[in-house]
Image (cartoon, grey):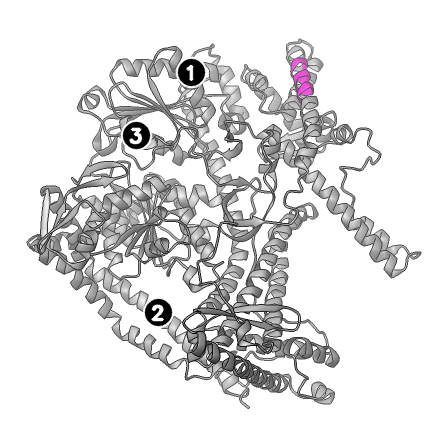
Amino acid sequence: MGFNEIIGNIFGNKATRDMKEVQPWVAKVKAAYPEVAQLDNNTLRAKTGELKKYIRDAAGKERERIEELKASIEQTEMEDREEIFTEIDKTEKKILDIYEKVLDEVLPVAFSIVKETAKRFTENEEIVVTATEFDRTLAATKDFVRIEGDNAIYQNHWMAGGNEIVWNMIHYDVQLFGGVVLHKGKIAEMATGEGKTLVATLPVFLNALTGNGVHVVTVNDYLSKRDSEWMGPLYQFHGLSVDCIDRHQPNSDARRQAYLADITFGTNNEFGFDYLRDNMAISPNDLVQRQHNYAIVDEVDSVLIDDARTPLIISGPVPKGDDQLFEEFRPLVEKLVEAQRALATKYLSDARKLIASDNKKDVEEGFLALYRSHKSLPKNKALIKFLSEQGIKAGMLKTEEIYMEQNNKRMHEVTEPLYFVIEEKLNSVDLTDRGIDLITGKSEDQTLFVLPDIAAELSALEADTSLTEEQKLEKKDAFMTNYSIKSERAHTISQLLKAYTMFEKDDEYVVIDGKVKIVDEQTGRIMEGRRYSEGLHQAIEAKEQVKVEAATQTFATITLQNYFRMYHKLAGMTGTAETEAGEFWNIYKLDVVVIPTNRLIVRKDMNDRVYKTKREKYKAVIEEIDRLVNDGRPVLVGTTSVEISEMLSKMLAMRKIEHNVLNAKLHQKEAEIVAKAGMKGIVTIATNMAGRGTDIKLSPEVVAAGGLAIIGTERHESRRVDRQLRGRAGRQGDPGSSVFFISLEDDLMRLFSSERIAGVMDKLGFKEGEMIEHTMISNSIERAQKKVEENNFGIRKHLLEYDDVMNKQRTVVYTKRRHALMGERIGMDITNMVWDRCVAPIESNDYEGCRMSYLQTLAMEVPFTENEFREEKKEILAEKSFNQAVANYKRKTEYLAQIANPVIKQIYENQGHMYENILIPITDGKRMYNISCNLKAAYESECKSVVRSFEKSILLHVIDEAWMENLRELDELKHAVRNASYEQKDPLLIYKLESVNLFDTLVNKINNQTISILMRGQIPVQDPSQVRQAAPEKRQDMSKYRENRQSLSNPGQGEAAQRDTREVKREPIRAEKVAGRNDPCPCGSGKKYKNCHGKN
């Protein structure tokens, strides 16, 4: 007995522990059910209302306290408001904790209500209840409910996803089990066909009772619309509102209403993009989302793992964005690739001859030529075929070892004759000296594509005593300009080379309507709106000779990982999560619980069938399909690319076997094709994960014939995707079978199968067309998949580490921005900015510098002499300056209101019926800002609202400009730190350190600009007849922005770290630091500084 088994016997394995934890909850539901089942229809519905009231009342005191605190804000001094807001935030968090406890308490009854409702819809064609206002509103738009007199009549059939469905589902015990797991914020792994969609109804209903909203997240808009229609009536019967964001335009009132529904369905991308759009909004009316309360993610592995490598990005045009070098350099790269192809072919031809020789020296030369051919073009089909011959791959791997010894000491001997070197595993292409010579040609500048040694050049310039400081600066500027031009050229060539050698049409991407569209390697679906990053997409567009899109500037970005981590509670469901359980826990703190199946799975999973070449493999696949069709069984063939699915389709057509094809080019009919895939003799070719979420139902004659047969045409990089394909068959105890056909030429085997396998294959000595099934081969495939999974996890973790740095910055900036937008906490933020601008100059050791800073930013003289500056405590100086600055600002805003008030009064009294909003010009002496104000609000508040509008407009304007600039600089920093690894430094560490400096600069810029404009704001004397009407406040136009998922050609889409918002200038002379107004007082009293020694 192994150690793990002994431990398992003592402590029980995870599945047993999970079962013990959840089973008592299921028992409670079963105990509560009989009582609920006895209620009549009206009482059953009334029970939901009782639960809602019970839950809301549990936090009644806390909600009242929040209202009291909000009411006290206006009467509280500005600097003391922070404590009120802190208490509000704490109380809101406490309410969420109270709700969690109460939801656990009412869970048995709530689950019983959902189960009984499902039972009544199954057993009755119509359910009659007394009509409520909600029913009457619903009946106006939905077919399944009609009003007759005082009664509402709900039917048990309705349209969902374009098909009519008759409700016939009641929750099993295992589905109650799954419901508990989801409510507890975990991932429920359930086999295909176990009714994941129905399981979700239990926790969704329960958590919707709080009124805080529940988000159900799906992988595509077909599923989000279908599921909202399919499950909706179950919730709506109990007065819960249901909507789907994918039915409405972004940024519209309808989208906002969808978020206000109790239950909101939508796709992961749209939830993320709505969050980004909300943080670009210029008016509270533009906001659509409310708080992130509870989300259930369907196909959670696809959303949180497969999609996690690609951040969501909203971008817009940039100046000189269409200044592209890709088309200019395309002919050069084509020439380069052709030369390399000729070279690779020659080396392969030489290798064939030399390896066949009896002379040992010739054989060694032959394997070197073969290795060079492999380094030149590893995807060359002739090379791949030759490597599958007996002893060839093993021989080449031995040669590779010789040249890689002692840290690649002799590798230059291999690469010197080549034009460029491809490292397929590292996804990189590097130009050699010979390649540079070829593309430089007879150009006058032979260093056209050579990057100079920047450190050496700059230090030589510094050491040159013959130059003045001014001349040195001029030369430095010229050198840096030249360096950046060459760097751009080298980058363009590198990306074009990648496009030509590593990205194949109809495999990694397709060209449709003159546009290059990425094909998802996991699902085979087209990823609409996604583009490769760092110019790779433009390089592929240049290669395919379609329009090269202009470069863009990032305005807002977030990874799905960081978006979903914002939810108070997150849960997920899928058929395959166990293999990624470690990643779910490490990144999201989500536990994976495997839910037992309702009926035993009887699907027969056969051993992999391994062939030597792809040709033999595909021939065997066609033979197998023919045999299965003759047996009367339906066949689902899973492929990894569009190219393979089209090739198999041609081969089947030649054999006159009828079939359907489902791939990235033909995805519109997806649900229809998948629904028919279970009929007798039907053959469906689908890319691996197409059709997820749509059940393949079998006819009785198919069940008798042996059920659905799954054929995989090659192993996927991820074991999880293979399990998903197998899981299409054998649902709910149906019969079925699955088998994978593999060849040694498949990418996975080619890149990751070891020398040992090549040796074993040769020793087994099987002839063409023969197939082997060997445990060592199967184990080796499993090991290769684990290697790739670890690599992909590394990429995702790396991406997250970079994004975590930025996430902290994003949280600070977006919180500040939301305060400005809503206006509630804007005064508090401005007060803190004033304090910051008073403190920073005092902490320098420069009286004149401090004086200039006060004049430039605070528009005032320093309230202390140079002597006091040298001798007085910094805290006292800071407090004195702060009090004067606040008093000045108060006077300034009162004066602004006085100037504006007579004009506003006159307009309102004489022309109030004509205007709703008016524009008030305010200038800081450098720039004119037209501030839109509501005329009535300005009149009634005696122009205090004008001051608030001014503050809000300036703060939003400054934050947005500074944040966009910061994003651009972080992007440039991410590119720059890559070279750190050549200096034996960790790029991530350098990125974190540098981004802290960038963030300090960002915060200082926001504080400086905001305070400077606010302190100088004046209204030019205004003639009421010249007042302009502001256009009615309308929603922000987002049409000029573009949303996309950026597929990373290189990992590390990074962003940067939070810092304290006060600038600290490092001065060796002074060690003391001024306490912040809200910091603990240095005297040790435990009070805040402003309430202790910081008082006047």
Q: Secondary structure at mark 2?
A: helix
Asked whether, in this view, residue 792 is left or right of residue 628, the answer is right
Q: Which is more N-terminal, label 3 or label 2?
A: 2
Using the image as rendered, state which of residue 928 and residue 825 is in the foreground: 928
Using the image as rendered, state which of residue 963 and residue 139 is in the foreground: 139
615 vs 679: above or below: above
Question: Disc 3 marks which residue?
Answer: 672
Which marked residue is nearer to the observer: mark 2 or mark 3?
3
Using the image as rendered, state which of residue 646 and residue 1057 is in the foreground: 646
Q: Which is more N-terminal, label 2 or label 1?
A: 2
Asked whether, in this view, residue 296 is left or right of residue 759, the answer is left
Asked whether, in this view, residue 470 is left or right of residue 331, the answer is right
Question: Disc 2 marks which residue?
Answer: 92
What's under tag 3, amino acid-wise?
Answer: Glu
Magenta span contains residue 935: no
Asked whether, in this view, residue 1087 is left or right of residue 391, the answer is left
Using the image as rendered, state which of residue 617 and residue 402 is in the foreground: 617
Q: Which region shows up in magenta?
A: 341-350
Q: CA distance from mark 1 to mark 3?
A: 22 Å
1070 vs 19: above or below: below
Residue 461: x and y in percent read 85, 53
Residue found at the very far bottom of the displayed protein: 1096
What's under tag 2, amino acid-wise?
Answer: Glu
Which marked residue is nearer to the observer: mark 1 or mark 2?
1
Residue 626: x and y in percent read 33, 13
- Please report the residue visible at 26 percent of the width from the left and 44 percent of the height from the top: 229
Question: Disc 1 marks which residue?
Answer: 650
Our reading of the magenta stretch's main secondary structure is: helix
- Please report the residue visible at 57 percent of the width from the left and 39 percent of the height from the top: 1049
* Residues at circles 1 and 3 in contact by the CB criterion of under 8 Å: no
